[in-house]
Image (cartoon, rainbow, N blue to C red):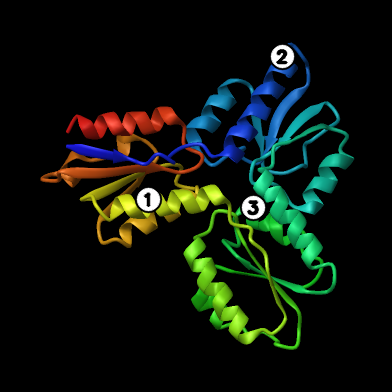
Amino acid sequence: MLVQRAKTAGFCMGVSLALHKLDNAIRRNSGSDKRLCTLGPIIHNPQVLSDYEKRGVTCLGNTDTVTSNDVVIIRAHGITKEVEQKLRQSGASIVDATCPRVKKAQTAIEAATTNGSSLLLFGEADHPEVKGLMSYARCGKFVFPDLDTLQQMTLDPEQSWVVASQTTQNATAFSAICSYLKSILPSLAILDTICDATGERQEEAGMIAGGVDAMVVVGGHQSGNTKRLAMLAAEKGISAYHVESTAELKKENFKGMQKIGLTAGASTPKALIDEAEQWLLAL
């Protein structure tokens, strides 16, 4: 069995930075009576979250129980402006671990909609990053998951519009969306908010998938960027297995295959990718 492992698989810069900030907070808080918590999952990987829980980090779903005796780390995906305001009013010590690319997108959306332009955001409506991005729009705001949905929307060509994307969305799909919008909206501003690392991972995953019998994609089932890597591989006409760990892999699925591709989401620890590679090599 040959395994072609993606060079871009694993932690991206934003995830590494967020975990570095959390690790520093744990060290600084050692011996303190303050509660250390993250506002939402710091990243979308269950194994990583479990490890931090064992180290005493509490994951909060909202700000309701936050007090001035808490140290709160804002997750890598960011939070809404309203939630951040409540967090700051609580008096808690705050560590902002929002990915720099997400923070840049938030700022760009706020600036681009200050003049009255409405926002069109390509993304998953229930994703925490998208909720945060939407909160920075000053005027009208609309989120859509794909081009087909967008084409069903009635958009006033006399109005000013801004189009942006969730940072981990498919770059090719976003390009097609922008082309369509430019054809129907005379006053359109396009914000380049897709992370470079996302595009690189997707491109490499597609190239690998084109030359293997099947693809294994390791990452949290709640991770949007991981799900998109698996979808890209499947579009090449091969079987793509999105798993959180090797426990989900089945030997019979790879029977008779000679070459398997391996990649992982931006929140996947190297140890889990190594484990998957060793499992495949042992077939």
Q: Secondary structure at mark 2?
A: loop
Quadrant in the rendering for residue 8: top left
Q: Nearer the viewer, mark 2 or mark 1?
A: 1
Disc 3 marks a residue whose amino acid type is: Glu
Q: Which residue is mark 3?
A: 129
Circle 1 — which element?
helix
Whether pointer 2 and pointer 1 mark residues with C-beta atoms closer than 8 Å, the reply is no
Q: Which is more foreground, mark 1 or mark 3?
A: 1
Measured Cα–Cα span from mark 2 to mark 1: 41 Å
Q: Report how far apart the C-alphas of labels 3 and 2 lie in the structure.
A: 30 Å
Residue density around tag 1, few if under 14, some if 14–19, many if 20 or more, within 10 Å: many
User: Which residue is pictured at 31% across the width and 58% down the height?
Assistant: 234
> Horizontally, is 21 left or right of 199 in the view?
right
Helix, strand or loop status at disc 3: helix
Sequence order check, earlier mark of 1 and 3 = 3
Whole-percent x, y for residue 134 in the image: 71, 61
Question: In the image, what residue occupies the spot 79% across and 68% down?
Answer: 113
x then y, percent, for residue 137: 77, 64
Q: Quadrant of the N terminus?
A: top left
Label 2 crowd (10 A; few <14 / some 14-19 / many >=20): few
Per the rendering, the mark at residue 205 is 1
Residues under labels 1 and 3: Cα distance? 23 Å
**Mark identifier at residue 30:** 2
Residue drawn at (25%, 57%), measured in percent from left and top?
238
- Left or right: where does residue 210 sit relative to residue 26? left
Residue 83 placement, left or right of 174? right
Q: Position of residue 37 (x, y in %)?
A: 70, 31
Q: Quadrant of residue 109?
A: bottom right
